[in-house]
Image (cartoon, helix red, strand yellow):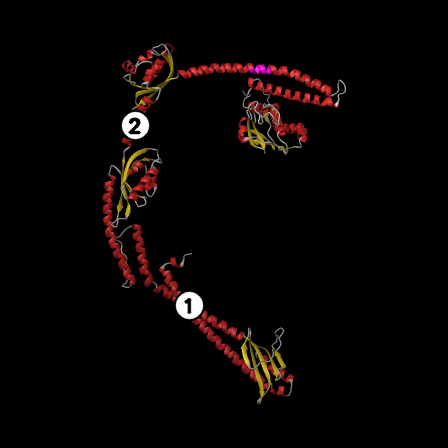
Amino acid sequence: MLRFQDRSIKSKLMFLTLMTSSIVLMLAGIASISYQILKVRQSLTYNLSTLAAVIGTNSTAALTFNDPKAGEETLAALAAYPRVIAAAIYTKEGRVFSTYVRDPAPEGFQPPPVEPALSRFERNALVVFRPIFLGEDRVGTVYIQSDLEDLYSALRQYTAVTAGLIVAASFVALLLASRFQRVVSEPISHLAKTAKAISIRKDYTIRAQKHGRDELGLLVQGFNEMLDEIQTRDAALGASELRFRTLTSHAPVGIFQTDPKGNCLFVNERWCDMAGMTPEEAKGEGWMRALHPEDKERVFNEWYDAAKAGREFASEYRFQTPQGKVTWLYGSAIALRNESGAVMGYIGTITDITERKEAEVQLKESENRFRQLAENIHQVFWMSDTFKQEMLYISPAYEKIWGRSCESLYRQPKSFVDAIHPEDQPRMKASLERQARGEGTDIVYRVVRPDGSSRWIRDRSFPIHDRSGRVYRMAGIAEDITQQREAEEELKQKTIQALEASRIKSDFVSNVSHELRTPINAIIGYSSLLLDETYGAVGQDQKAPLEGVVRNANDLLNLVNDVLDLSRIESGKMAIRLGPVDIPALIEGILSGMQPLFEKKSLFARFHPPETFPVIQSDAEKIKQITINFLSNAVKFTKKGGVTISVKDRPERGGIAFSIQDTGIGIKPEELPKIFDAFHQVDASATREFGGVGLGLAIVKKLIDLLQGEIRVESEYEKGSTFTVYLPYRLERVKESAS
């Protein structure tokens, strides 16, 4: 819904006229109704007072002779007046003498206490008290109460008549206003339509029609005079703009114009060609997209500094078209100022300097390349003419490596081939043929120096093209790789020796471990027989040493087994037995067997297996060995609390994961990188509290690698550790060793 301010002048005039007329008529009607109601009230009061006087006169005899019945007969005459609700006659003492109540009687009516002579309007009734006189003596009082139906009826009648008159008068006022408002609204409306037509068509020859000599006529006259001036200026501006566009459209440079904030107002065709944009795309801030991203911030800063200092802007920068073409430009701009010196905008030009820039860059790159290659490297840099088959340049390093002068090579370009080892000359000749065809080469060969020594050389060449794409030069770098070749050969020999030594060591460790297991098993067996009293009773003082022998022998056997496992893995003899592995079931079985260890130290072991979990294809025994090692360490290094085991399916990693978290002593941050090293112990002091030789985690790490898994450790010193193992659903290929 339109606001009042937004409505047409016609609607406003009609609305104001109608509202004024309606308000005046309404006020007049209210005054008339009020006057008529006042007259009706006065008439009702007079009539009821007169009736009370008649009743009082007719009741003197009844009061004189104290005849209430006669008084009621007198009051019964009020039945002829339907507006009378009730009446009463009082003695001069104020006692009720006789009463009258209209049928039907008002509910709960009681004559009110006698009051002096009066008449008053109550909420829904008119009440009159009038004294009764006999001669000069007051003998009683008459009371009459009537309803106000006559008053309400008159009010409704007068209101209806007045409302009808107001509506009729308002309608007449509306008709008159709709006709007379044209005197004011039509000139204004015509003026507004004329202004809108000029704005849309840009035709300043249109004029507004003058309707009179009043203020509206003066407004129209001033408007037309303003159009005359605008038309004159527009014609001059059009001619000037035509000359400007004719000039700029044929200019060999890009021309642009902006407002004071740098928003583009105009660009010529040459500017659009260099920017790869249309004039519409360049308008406003669109021209900024043509600036190369690497130059944008610099150009803005230079523009801002020039504008702030009031000087000409001049800079070299790049345009980049949407297709990726880059053009180097020289741009300049000056401020356009009005008569007061305020900046009205900027006008400037851009000139394509791409060829000059490319030549400068190429020259600079060429100079730097030659200088750096010739003076700062130990490799030999060379350049030759592929057509004339002559050497154009050779760096001084040639003399040091080849042991021959550069001048000799300039005189005889192919003389360096004679210095190449006979076995490598066929490959060199093939390389030269490829270079002659403009192909790059990469060849390794030997040169024989004049003193008889030889050097290994790696020679790489690449073609240089002219602007037409034709190969006209070959450049190359030859480097002495003798030390590298010798180091590679030495490393190869040492690697062979190391592998042989590792094999011998593994075989020795394996043989020694097997030899140690036999006597250790015998010690454990005989000691167990003694403890079982197979050979007779054993005293309590003898059992403790025997139990120590069995315990230490078992520890030694475990150590031998660990060493043997490590040896097998490193020698590549540890086999993998693939099969289905139910990880939750495997963990539950291990926990069941290790429960006495947890109970012995009063530690909890929590594991809540999931309802469903994928069965993986892996080596169950090795996973069991890994899990037992982690749980054994957790029990060993945990004094209170316990261990929590969790399993998770990790399809995003292509496998599963299980974690063992303890509340033990934790691992110091500086120890974490070394915990999987063989024979490394967190507490290596002579008074260390916990046993072990440091092979468990080393074997675990190698077993996990063997199973193509991954292990991660999180630990907080003195608060506990979490070991997480990731295993694939199925091994990609069975490895025989993790070495």
What is the secondary structure assignment of the residue under circle 1? helix
Q: Residue 92 — which label?
A: none
Left or right: residue 496 compared with residue 298: right
Q: Residue furthest right?
A: 537
Q: Is residue 261 above or below residue 114?
A: above
Observer-nearest of 457 and 109: 457
Q: CA distance from mark 1 to mark 2?
A: 93 Å
- Furthest residue toward bottom: 135
Dot 1 or dot 2: first in sequence order is 1
Say what secondary structure mark 2 lies in.
Answer: helix
Query: Which kind of residue does numbered mark 2 sit on?
Result: Lys
Residue 439 appearing in the image: no
* Amino acid type indicated by mark 1: Ile
Q: How many marks?
A: 2
The picture quadrant where one finds residue 598 is top right
Q: Is residue 33 left or right of residue 570?
A: left
Q: Residue shown at 39%/17% (left/top)? A: 481
The residue to which callout 1 is attached is 23
Q: Quadrant of residue 287?
A: top left
Residue linked to disc 2: 364
Residue 146: percent from left, percent from top: 56, 77
Image spot of residue 360 (x, y percent)? 28, 29
Compare residues 489 and 386 and report the one nearer the observer.
489
Q: Give percent across and percent down for residue 533.
A: 75, 20
Label 2 crowd (10 A; few <14 / some 14-19 / many >=20): few
Judge whether residue 255 is colored magenta. no
Q: Quadrant of the C terminus?
A: top right
For marks 1 and 2, give the one nearer the viewer: 2
Identify the residue at image location x=70%, y=19%: 527
Q: What's the magenta region?
A: 505-510
Image location (x, y in percent) of residue 174: 39, 65
